[in-house]
Image: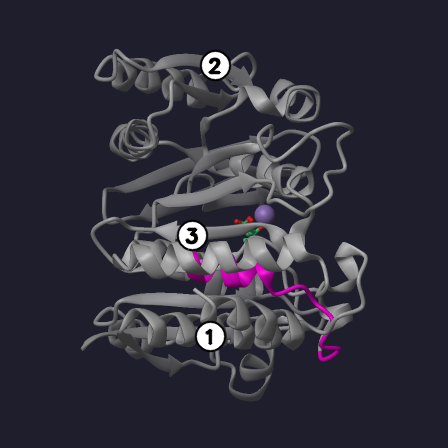
Amino acid sequence: MVSYKIALIPGDGIGPEIIAEGQKVIDAASDICGFKINWVKYPFSADHYLETKELLPMDSLKEIERMDSIYLGALGDPRMKPGVLEKGILLALRFYFDQFVNLRPVKLLEGVECPLKNKKPKDIDFTVVRENTEDFYVGVGSHAKEGHSKETLEIKRSLYEVKFDLDIEADRDEVAYQIGILSRKGSERIIRYAFELAKKKNLSRVTSVDKANVLSDIYGFWREIFSEVSKDYPGIDTEYNFVDAITMWFIRKPEWYQMIVSPNMFGDIITDLGAMIQGGLGLAPGGNINPDGISMFEPIHGSAPKYKGMNSANPIATIWSGSMMLEELGEEKAARFVLKAIEEVLKEGKVRTRDLGGSSKTHEVGDAVVEKLKDM
Ligand code: IPM
Ligand code: MN
């Protein structure tokens, strides 16, 4: 029997509760479709850090490197300074495994109420391909006190290494700065990924997101590369949207969009909005993908510490992310079954967590999805 080894990182807050449901559903799908998952659990989280001072040790990364995928709950905890877990665990994983694609489907499922008036599932069905390793996420920045100072900032990636030697003269005030980086190869590979996916899905339009009217060096470069890559896909229409405008169009005319490709930070922002128009954060899945390496699947929402341990969070985003993981592993049938089972539970409407107006518990949603799977 085919088997897969998956690193399981439940994380913080509601992470452990929702990931347990994802695991349950994936195990059920594997039984039905005839493969096996070997889960290897890792403790990386705020609790683990506070106990051991360890975030994400290199030997674990090396172990995970030999596995098939990573399944993650959520990270973030109010006891920690913002960014410590996010950068030290989540972004560290994305960067270490060079998961340059952040794949975020925005799809209103049957049975889910849309906050936009008169919009139906056929109107909200597009994919955001977010670049996941560059832009303002490279972590290159600092601040300089008044006067003269020097700073060396470096970024190391599998694609390249860049060093900035800064000589700073601030005459009257303290300044903070952050350097965003796009590379030609880094932009090209993500834009090409979006076009290839559009081709595979028979879509007719790819939209590029940027802010080239103001941040013209970095996003003018993005546009240039988008335009070059698009020439290889003559059958697909293209357009540029400014990031501010696209937030308006997501509300006014979401049915326009098919495939969107975006630099990292704007992709982060617009996919929270995307989550809302598909019915809420509890329903928005995501994958951090390295097509030739180790990918990682996680809901796009955070750890919701307020709801920790209450067994009330919606696990559907996580279960759906699990379906995306199955697809990436090549278990397409199982992936389809899981998504279908989610849709049936939602359409039936009997089992719903509080965010969807119901009173079901987290584990009841997982159980309901498993029941539907068993009928398939
Ligand atoms: C997301 C999150 C992360 C991001 C944070 C937690 C680092 O907001 O996955 O969208 O900005 O990518
Ligand atoms: Mn986000």
Is residue 315 one of those drawn in magenta? Answer: yes
Q: Quadrant of residue 186?
A: top left
Crowding at dot 1, Cα within 10 Å, few <14 / some 14-19 / many 20+, comes out as some
- Which disc, if any, is residue 287? 3
Dot 1 falls on a residue whose secondary structure is: helix
Which of the two labelled residues, at mark 1 and mark 2, occupies the earlier sequence position? Answer: 1
Query: Given the image, on which type of amino acid does mark 3 rest?
Result: Gly
Q: Is label 3 in contact with label 2 (beta carbons under 8 Å)?
A: no
Which residue is tagged 2?
240
Q: Is residue 118 left or right of residue 129?
A: right
Query: For this rendering, which residue is in front, 330 or 275?
Result: 330
- Discs 1/2, front: 1
Name the spot of residue 339 as percent of width and height, x first.
48, 55
Q: Which residues are magenta?
A: 309-324
Query: For this rendering, which residue is in front, 363 or 308?
Result: 363
Name the spot of residue 138 as percent of width and height, x first.
43, 45
Q: Is label 1 in contact with label 3 (beta carbons under 8 Å)?
A: no
Which residue is tagged 1?
23
Relative to 337, say whether 272 is above or below.
above
Which of the two labelled residues, at mark 3 and mark 2, occupies the earlier sequence position? Answer: 2
- Discs 1/3, front: 1
Query: Given the image, on which type of amino acid does mark 1 rest?
Result: Gln
Crowding at dot 2, Cα within 10 Å, few <14 / some 14-19 / many 20+, comes out as some
Tell me what residue is drawn at x 27 percent, y 30 percent: 196
Name the spot of residue 169 as percent of width and height, x first.
55, 31
How many numbered marks appear?
3
Which of the two labelled residues, at mark 1 and mark 3, occupies the earlier sequence position? Answer: 1
